Amino acid sequence: MKITNARIVLLDRVIERGTIEIENERIIGIREGIEKDSDIDAGGKYLAPGIVDLHTHGSGGFDFMDGEESDIHGAAHSLAMFGTTCCLPTTLTSSDEELFAFLDNLKSAQKNRSNNECRMPGAHLEGPYFNMDQKGAQDPRYIIPPKKGHYMKVLEKADGNIKRWSVAPEVDGAMEFIKDVSKMGVVISGGHTKADFDTVGRAVENGMTMLTHYYSAMSSMIKKGSWKILGVTEAGFYFDELTVELIADGCHIPANLLKLIFKLKDRDHIIGISDSMRGAGFESGDSILGPKNNGTPVIIEDGVAKLSDRSCFAGSIATGIRLVKTLATLAEENMVSVFKTVSYNPARIIGMEKEIGSLEEGKYADFIIFDDEYKLDSVYISGEKVR
């Protein structure tokens, strides 16, 4: 199959009028120019890598922790319809029973995944080892400190399927957890934390490499008497080793702060994520954050999910293509930077950059086509059109 007359977004440039050729699920050629013998004319629209979302709880009315394998398939299908071609299904703090059910269901869903669902190479555990003072929308009933007996039990149950784990580095037992689990190849990310700068530094030394939803549910500089105490947000700028994760929905991080982050932080260490809950794809109404039978009631309004008392945001309703629009219009990043942020960098973090995350010969043909107004035209996974 050949698609021509497309603005093809590569890692280093945009081909203004190009042709891409796909065979046996993979890209076999990317060329300048419009070719007459092509199967599809893209009409000058953008053709770019599919979004790789390392932090999403669900979409289309489904949450990955709803309790059935069919719910995981439903969420993965909805994500794909909005431009996400690979994701890490993400948990919330929950009972062990709910967590273990999710891990079992994910294994089964991975084996039975259809091509109209995004890839799911593993899970992101968001919790339960958080600071209660920065719990945000996390259920306080299940927030606990990390203990080796517990996290080793979770790791055994997951059987290598945990790609990323978010933790508050200041809670009792966290440093041992970070050291132990990072050595197993799991990406450790600081989140829902009120750690000070020095604690983040120790966590980095022990293997923490990311910060979860930067500027949300984390500490910033405070004053104690006349002394200024730096927090997690300042540490995110200071430590080059840390990749910061941005909820690119245009609500959690305002435009000027997005621009500041891109101005101060190396673009190799920024990723865009949705942090989407089941309401992604809907514009308003009542919903539930977390498992449908044991989750937290939320309200969808103003382009975001909020707790019922409107005291804080409760996850986003961003879709894959909305991440692209936010970074291009609010952050004012060019297309190469946008797709490095939402596609290549996330793929690299989970060790999949040789297969997905950018448009290159030999990689899977996972890509999206959209117009200048960020209206999604089509989505391809392994060269097959799924939307």
Image (tube, rainbow, N blue to C red):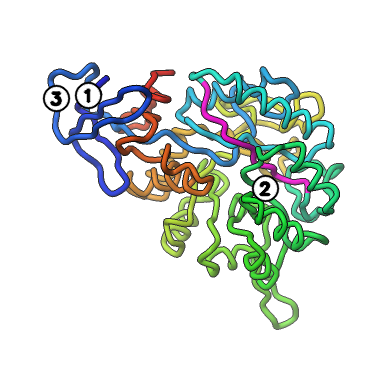
Magenta residues, start to end: 117-128
Task: Please name the amino acid that badge 2 sits on.
Answer: Trp
Instruction: Choose the circle earlier in sequence order: 2 or 3.
Output: 3
123 is within the stretch colored magenta = yes
**Cα distance, mark 2 to mark 3?**
46 Å
- Determine crowd level at label 1: few under 14, some 14-19, many 20+ residues with C-alpha closer than 10 A: few
Residue 261 percent across, percent down from the top left: 47, 59
Give me the C-alpha separation between circle 3 and circle 1: 12 Å
Q: Amino acid at mark 1?
A: Gly
Q: Position of residue 205 (x, y in %)?
A: 64, 68
Numbered mark located on residue 292 in the image: none
Which of 44 and 150 lies nearest the eye of the viewer?
A: 150
Residue 303 can be seen, yes or no: no
Q: Could you say whether the residue bearing mark 3 is in a helix, strand or loop?
A: loop
Query: What residue is pinned by disc 1?
Result: 43
Distance from the alpha carbon under mark 2 to that under mark 1 = 42 Å
Q: Residue at x 62, y 34 (%)?
A: 89
Q: Which residue is mark 3?
A: 35
Q: Is residue 102 visible?
A: yes
Quadrant of res 68 = top right
Give x and y (percent) for residue 128: 78, 46
Circle 3: residue type: Glu
The residue carrying mark 2 is 165
Sequence-wise, the earlier of marks 3 and 1 is 3
Observer-nearest of 354 and 208? 354
| Residue 71 quadrant | top right
